[in-house]
Image (cartoon, grey):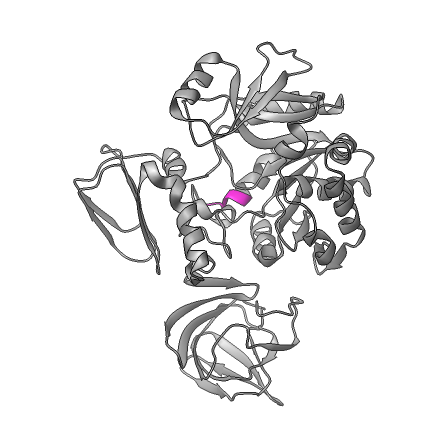
Amino acid sequence: MIVPVILAGGSGSRLWPLSRSAYPKQLLALVGSRTLLQDTVLRTQAIPHMAPPILICNQEHRFLVAEQLKQIGMTNAVIILEPVGKNTAPAAAIAALYLKQKMVNPTLLILPADHIIKDVAPFVSAMHHAERNAQAGRLVTFGIVPSRPETGYGYIKSAIYANEEQGYKVLEFVEKPDYTTANAYLASGQYYWNSGMFMFQATVYLEELARYAPDIFHTCQEAVKGMMQDLDFLRLNQEIFAACPNNSIDYTVMEKTQNAVLVNLNAEWNDMGSWSALCEMMEADQDGNVMQGDVMAQQVRNSYLRAESRMLAVIGLDNHIVVETSDVVLVAHKDHCQNVKEMVNSLRQKQRPEIDLHFRVYRPWGYYEMIDKNACFQVKHITVKPGASLSLQQHHYRSEHWVVVRGIAEVTRGEEIFTIKANESTYIPQGVKHRLANPYGEDLEIIEVQSGSYLGEDDIVRFDDEYGRVASL
């Protein structure tokens, strides 16, 4: 039986400002109605005899990931939380070590959560071929049959001839080439796009990891030994895992082992690594434009235009990306899409909040949206899901006014417990313990006005929380 291991810990900074660290691209519905994560999970279930998946994600995304799995009916997945991202080699090791406690030498299918594969039939066929190789003790990497001289992907060079039972022998992994080199790769027939997908037996991978990267192997061993159950999640030992080296499966194992083979995958594949990559997956109009949302365009060609919160009017552009969100507008030439990550790094140095948080900030109980703010007040629109509640908490520096605009709120204020409904309000003085809950069957919406000398999200002292949180999330 194959166990899919879905790596969902990335930040997706090249798709900023839509993808941000608090809500990255794998959690977004970029193409179609389902998110990239949901499509990845469902794709694995098209393969016969596939086990429920293991997902490895950042601990800050745990409730978002769990909710998305629930939406597609995946209730038996295992979710392992990383306290900090350490790349793919440690993530695969954590999954392999965990599964070896449950099964006799399972076969792992390692999949990033942010890929698009439109044609599932070749994907399923490639999995059968890879499984035969993995069960023979080989480490399989999947090479995408290139359709163009792409400079945005790494490549894998393979032997010319393949044995049906052994696949193509891997000769070399190469970094992203320039256009001339990429064109030569395409003409040779020996080079494939590096998909970042793998299949191998747990024991085989761990043996190779111990040989080539013993520090990663031993650190992951100790982190799994210290793993603890936290609600529906498995939480790695934070102190141990934080010391783990940061490296990819490619660099750590696949480039060094003598046992690597390539199975080719000829499908409509895209790793969603840039805005231009996303544009390629969408159907363009007669002018070559892809337009999403409330967009008006004149004399615009070969561009991607996306409006999230208001009308976007664009005139006289060619080969551009324009993405509007409620707090950021990105304008970039398609030839410079790979530089979006550099912009994000510059913003991080300036400590700009726009790299982390959207206008809408999701929490396990629902979400809030910022309406207005300055140094001494801020106004939020808060939505609480049916049956959910915020923690019992206290603020040292601010007071809060709540006005219900939809639903019925159950309010705990000090020793009082009472309800307020639409068009009613209440006041929470600074320093008073309080809780907002929605025990009813429809969304609760309130307008919250905060006032005080400090309004940061870290001014929360929690006394009770059904989600087990101790920080300000």
Give the x, y percent position of residue 92.
Answer: 68, 40
Q: Is residue 231 toward the left or the right of residue 20 in the image?
A: right
Q: Is residue 136 toward the left or the right of residue 467 in the image?
A: right
Give the x, y percent position of residue 267.
Answer: 49, 25
**Magenta stretch in the rendered image:** 33-37
Location of the N terminus by quadrant is top right
Vertical position of residue 181 compared to residue 371: above or below = above
Residue 207 placement: quadrant: top right
Give the x, y percent position of residue 438.
Answer: 55, 73
Give the x, y percent position of residue 414.
Answer: 60, 89
Q: What residue sits 57% from the left and 67% below the top?
A: 473
Q: What residue sits 70% from the left and 34% below the top?
A: 108
Q: Does the magenta segment cover residue 36?
A: yes
Residue 406 placement: quadrant: bottom left
Say whether residue 468 is visible.
yes
- 57 or 90: nearer the eye? 90
Vertical position of residue 473 compared to residue 28: above or below = below
- 251 or 24: nearer the eye? 251
